[in-house]
Image (tube, helix red, strand yellow):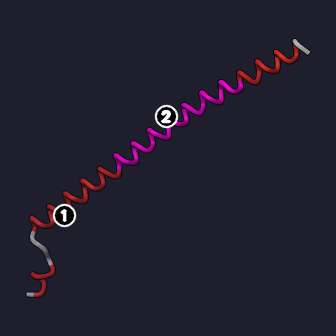
Amino acid sequence: MKDRCLKSAPSVEKRRRKKKKEKKKGKEKEKKKKKEKRKRKKKIYKNINKKIKKRKKGKEIYNSIFR
């Protein structure tokens, strides 16, 4: 009698497993989204840094000519 009470019905188990799977999928999607966001940010900052470096070089050349 005790064993019967402890074990839940197979349909309930199925539902639980399905929920767990969906939750895992959702978490993976979130991770992917965050990764993409980080990638995009990195790209933007990389471009900004490039522009700054170019500007600095330009300033140095300008200053060396007009001293």
Which quarter of the image is occupied by the N terminus?
bottom left
Is residue 54 left or right of 35 when viewed as pictured?
right
Chain part drawn in magenta: 28-53
Disc marking residue 59 = none
Q: Secondary structure at mark 2?
A: helix
Write down the residue under mark 2: 40
User: Residue visible at 65% across and 24% down?
Assistant: 51
Instruction: Name which of mark 2 and mark 1 comes first in the sequence.
Output: 1
The foreground one among 13 and 48 is 48
Q: CA distance from mark 2 to mark 1?
A: 36 Å
Q: Magenta stretch: residue 39 in it?
A: yes
Residue 46 in the image, given as x and y percentages of width and height: 60, 31
User: Residue visible at 34% across and 46% down?
Assistant: 29
Q: Magenta stretch: residue 10 in it?
A: no
Amino acid tagged 2 = Arg
What is the number of callouts on the image?
2
The local crowd at label 1, few if under 14, some if 14 to 19, many if 20 or more residues have their Cα within 10 Å, is: few
Write down the residue under mark 1: 16
Is residue 65 left or right of 12 when viewed as pictured?
right
Q: Is residue 3 above or below residue 20?
A: below
Residue 37 in the image, given as x and y percentages of width and height: 46, 39
Q: Secondary structure at mark 1?
A: helix
Q: Is residue 33 above or below residue 66?
A: below
